[in-house]
Amino acid sequence: MRIFSGIQPTGRKHLGNYIGAISQYVAAQDRGEALFCIVDLHAITVPYEPTELRERLYDTTAILLAAGLDPERCMLFRQSDVKEHTELTWLLCSVTELGRLQRMHQFRDKSLSQRELVSAGLLLYPVLQAADVLAYRANEVPVGEDQREHLELMRDVARRFNARFGDGEEVLVVPEHRIPEVGARIMDLQDPTRKMSTTGAGGTAGAAGGQGTVYVLDEPAAIEKKLKGAVTDSGSEIRRDAEKPGVSNLIEILAAVRGVVPETVEAEHAQARYGEFKTAVAAAVADYLAPARERYVELRADEARIESILQGGAERAQAIASQTLADVRERMGLGAPRAGGPAATSGTLDTVRR
Ligand code: AMP
Ligand code: TRP
């Protein structure tokens, strides 16, 4: 079983990332051969600062290490270090439908909110993401709910490639997504109708100063303040209900960090008031994030070690990806024919080789 996931080098990872994705990455190390890629090539599809990008990439790497990714038990690497990702992106473009890319939710949202240039990279973002996974013939992709559409496209691209170039064989593996049952979509604490994100409600520029988003590196006092200030709903019952998005989100958060089902949280807090309940959630979240925050400082300080981990990961990853690319190029009729490749038996290629 090979497991692959990618994460943006935004540096400020939040509770939604941690619950929805990072905790699954850590568990994946025991379930199979795991690869985790920090996707700097995806980050350049929107406006960014080159010097900042390297810093944020180190921040993100240190957060992943602090959360429990172990370079001995997984391959942790930087996307731009493995050139096979970009090459495969271009090759997969030939089996990707343009209209489908234009209809992707993320492309529509990001291109509408973009004040500067809407880059072609933003449109091709999902093809690069498909290449990330397909280059490793990964079986499983742990992600949060917001990546479902990207995973569907990736599966279609793999199927279409196999149908067009596979000659009856599964040259590229059609991967399965792994979206957690609880915590796949943590919502903003100030506006529980939208997902928690780095640009949350009352975001950095707003008066509330990002009060809707709990960051992995937040101090316990900040976590407590944000959770106690979380928007709840009218009524006083602690139960999940479409009409109660604020309380439902807090129930989901507490269930996820404690590793129990939401029903357990509802039963245990049936008699609690909102205020008491929020205090309990705040304490649990602070405890949940504390070990990673404490380990982070030391890990982040050693940039030479981070670089060497990333480079070691990239070397091992590339050894896998280069084999896939050799097969893909051969199947697509690109480059010099490979001895023993599927096309090598054909008469025309024999002529070429002589
Ligand atoms: P990103 O930081 O955008 O690269 O996201 C990294 C991972 O976190 C992806 O697998 C996302 O699906 C997941 N994720 C992002 N936001 C949330 C959220 N609010 N709740 C749960 N998972 C999330
Ligand atoms: N698009 C993903 C996100 O924003 C990050 C990502 C890039 C990814 N490549 C991937 C996730 C491959 C899973 C597999 O979160």
Image (cartoon, grey):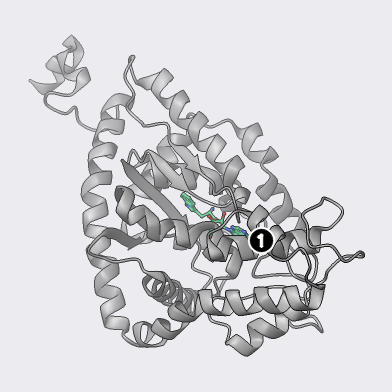
Q: In which quarter of the image is residue 279?
A: bottom right
Residue found 61% across the figure and 41% down from its top: 149
Q: In which quarter of the image is residue 256?
A: bottom right
Horizontal relation, residue 294 to residue 108: left or right: left
Horizontal relation, residue 222 to residue 3: left or right: right
Residue found 11% across the figure and 22% down from its top: 353
Horizontal relation, residue 62 to residue 228: left or right: left
Residue found 48% across the figure and 76% down from its top: 56
Q: What residue is shown with label 1?
A: 265
Q: Is residue 134 positioned above or below 219 on the image?
A: above
Can residue 83 be seen in the rendering of this structure?
Answer: no
Q: Which of 178 and 110 is in front in this view?
A: 178
Can residue 342 be seen in the rendering of this structure?
Answer: yes
Q: Is residue 90 positioned above or below 316 on the image?
A: above
Q: Is residue 144 positioned above or below 197 on the image?
A: above
Q: Is mark 1 on a helix, strand or loop?
A: helix
Mark 1 crowd level (few <14, some 14–19, many ≥20, 10 Å Cα): many
Residue found 69% across the figure and 55% down from its top: 110
- Which residue is at the far right? 234
x then y, percent, for residue 83: 32, 53
x then y, percent, for residue 332: 33, 26
x then y, percent, for residue 61: 40, 71
- Which residue is at the far top? 347
